[in-house]
Image: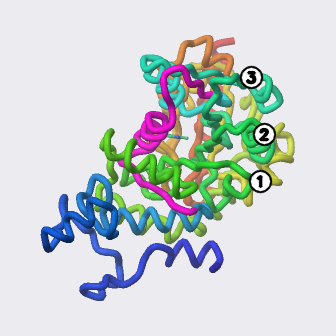
Amino acid sequence: MKRFRTRAVHAGQRPDPLTGAHATPVYSTSTFAYGSFERGARLFEGEEAGFIYSRIGNPTVRAFEEKMASLEGAEDAVAFSSGMAAVSALAFTLLRPGDEVVYLAPLYGGTEGFFLETLQKFGVIATDAGDVERLEARLSPATRLIYLETPTNPNLCIYDLAEVARVARAHGILSCVDNTFATPYLTRPLEFGIDLVLHSATKYLGGHGDALGGVLAGPKELIDAVRMEGLRHLGGALGAFEAFLLLRGLKTLPLRMEAHCAGALRVAEYLAKHPTVRRVHYPGLPSHPGHAVARRQMQGFGGLVSLELPSREAAGAFLNSLELFTQAVSLGDVESLATHPASTTHQLLEPALRERHGITEGLVRLSIGIEDPDDLIADLEQALERATATTLVDS
Ligand SMILES: Cc1ncc(COP(=O)(O)O)c(C=O)c1O
């Protein structure tokens, strides 16, 4: 098998058989001609492989799926119109009324909201196990799926994938990791015994903030089941143009991730020394509680850094003063972004739940882009001066 960087460029893509086009064309078509009555019947019987209708398969989308399966070391992958479309397709395919999802909080707020509100309407229970140490004790005969992110959104906890996989396998329960923050360049959960990997492709996989997408990778049998039920029936199909953008983004994933990781480490080290910053969350800092596990299971510590300022007002002053960072949700773009999780991405969660997950009013999440880290640090420096002034007025 070729190495990761080579697969990022080549996997899933070959010159177009019809025209020789070197870049994978955008197959912008809803349907595909069978050619004959007999072939149509064979396609629908599954006796012949081929494209039928773009909601369940499209050549540009298929190239993206094949590249992702290769990068995650999975048998197969299925793409979606967004990360949430992937989460919901997975859940509605695998779970039945009375089943339980046990998850390790915190999760992306939309995912936790979907588990606690939407799935509950369909009789599925979602339980936060708290941490890996308590995971085994929290499982019940109804537990069908263990779900987690690592690093977590937004405060970058690290969970031990080998331990989660051990528990899941010992109890015959499926495990799924949302690998959006790490990307397969930094962590490949299947190598640790996890069953399924999910991504919001909107983030680092695309990398340029111009496409929404999602993907699920794992054993062919499970991927086929999710394609034929969760994708076909819920309909959250990835568009061909978005697939084209994601394919282009993936070619530079290794290069971008190196730059994101190097910049984030510099920023985290700078913030850790700043007197107004109460705490920095970055798995690359030796002081981070998950540092040793991160060293074991990550090939770099990622591009997200969270910092705690003394108050919501200080966080607001800091964010309003940033010039290079854009105040916006999302992450993983080449441009640096900054957000206040308590009032944005995690605003729908009950305040008590936010507090329990460590999403404080002073917490700010930075997505470090690929700009020169010296320029980013200069921007943070001047914004922290404003935040410090707010703190002095408050006290
Ligand atoms: C870790 C994580 N998973 C899933 C999602 C949902 O993805 P999407 O916005 O593509 O639906 C997000 C979105 O921010 C996320 O950060």
For mark 3, give the secondary structure: helix
Comes first in the chain, label 3 or label 1? 3
Determine which residue is flagged by label 3: 138
In this rendering, does residue 175 appear at all? yes
Tell me the residue at 60%/28% (across/down): 101
Marks 2/1: CA–CA distance: 21 Å
For mark 1, give the secondary structure: helix
Q: Position of residue 393 (x, y in %)?
A: 63, 15
Determine which residue is flagged by label 2: 170
Q: Nearer the viewer, mark 3 or mark 2?
A: 2
Tell me the residue at 30%/63% (across/down): 58
**In this view, 241 is above or below 39:** above
Q: Nearer the viewer, mark 3 or mark 1?
A: 3
Q: From the image, which quarter does the N terminus lie in?
A: bottom right
Residue 43 lies in magenta, yes or no? Answer: no
Comes first in the chain, label 2 or label 1? 2
Marks 3/2: CA–CA distance: 14 Å
Q: Position of residue 295 (x, y in %)?
A: 82, 53
Q: As shown in the figure, which amino acid type bears the numbered disc 2?
A: Ala
Would you say the residues marked 3 and 1 are in contact, meaning their CB atoms lie under 8 Å apart?
Answer: no
Q: Position of residue 190 (x, y in %)?
A: 67, 55
Q: As shown in the figure, which amino acid type bears the numbered disc 3?
A: Arg
Q: From the image, which quarter does the C terminus lie in?
A: top right
Determine which residue is flagged by label 1: 297
Is the CB of mark 3 within 8 Å of ligand 1? Answer: no
Stretch of the chain drawn in magenta: 75-101
Task: Give neighbour class at mark 1: few <14, some 14-19, many 20+ (Cα, 10 Å).
Answer: many
Residue 80 lies in magenta, yes or no? Answer: yes
Please give the count of numbered marks on the rendered protein.
Answer: 3
From the viewer's perspective, tell me whether residue 160 is left or right of residue 229: right
Tell me the residue at 33%/62% (across/down): 46
Quarter location, residue 315: top right
